[in-house]
Amino acid sequence: MQYEAKTPEEYLKLLENDWRKEKLLDIRRIILEYAPELVESIHYKMLCYGNELIKIFYLNAQKSYVSLYVGTIEKVENSDILLEKFNFGKGCIRIKKSIDISNTGLETFIKQTIDIWRAGGDTSCY
């Protein structure tokens, strides 16, 4: 789904109060607590996290799942194991209602992605 929001605050207000908002807020918390230096903004009508030059994550509530876009997933060591409970593609992790995020490797995956970025590594989709 696309939300016509100009700020993260507007985006969050537009979300319906359902399981998607709960999951999205949980992922957002993980990102912002581990990397407070990342700037949260709106890009491509989604929440995004990064700096002026590089966006590391995009986060969006879809109709039947929450999407976390991360460049190329396989650049993170053991990503297939960390994300085994998720449906994911080259750069998109789909978080469905039935997934309990706390019982997955998603938080570790997010932290490893941020660590790669902090070390100057490439987290892009190229």
Image (cartoon, rainbow, N blue to C red):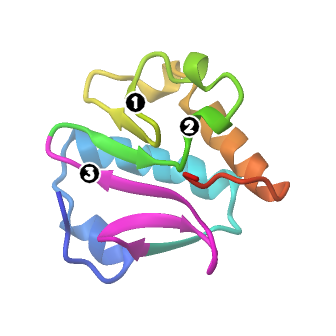
Residue that label 2 marks = 73
Asked whether 31 or 55 is in front, the reply is: 55
Residue at the image point whose x is 24% and y is 69% from the top: 13
Residue at the image point whose x is 25% and y is 43% from the top: 20
Q: Mark 1 belongs to which amino acid?
A: Phe
Asked whether 63 or 117 is in front, the reply is: 117
Mark closer to the chain start, 2 or 1: 2
Residue that label 3 marks = 61
Residue that label 1 marks = 88
Q: Residues within 10 Å of mark 1 (few under 14, many from 20)?
A: some
Residue at the image point whose x is 37% and y is 48% from the top: 24
Q: Nearer the viewer, mark 2 or mark 3?
A: 2
Instruction: Tell me residue 125's x, y (percent).
Output: 55, 51
Q: Which of marks 1 and 3 is in front?
A: 1
* Residue closest to the far right: 119
Residue 90 lies in the magenta stretch: no
Q: Mark 2 belongs to which amino acid?
A: Ile
Label 2–label 1 contact, CB within 8 A = yes
Q: Mark 3 belongs to which amino acid?
A: Ala
Vertical position of residue 35 compared to residue 91: above or below: below
Give the image quarter of residue 11.
Answer: bottom left
Q: Report the side of 8 relative to 33 (left or right).
A: left
Residue 46 lies in the magenta stretch: yes
Element type where label 1 sits in the image: strand
Mark closer to the chain start, 1 or 3: 3
In the image, which residues are magenta? 42-63
Label 1–label 3 contact, CB within 8 A = no
Residue at the image point whose x is 40% and y is 65% from the top: 47
Instruction: Tell me residue 38's x, y (percent).
Output: 64, 67
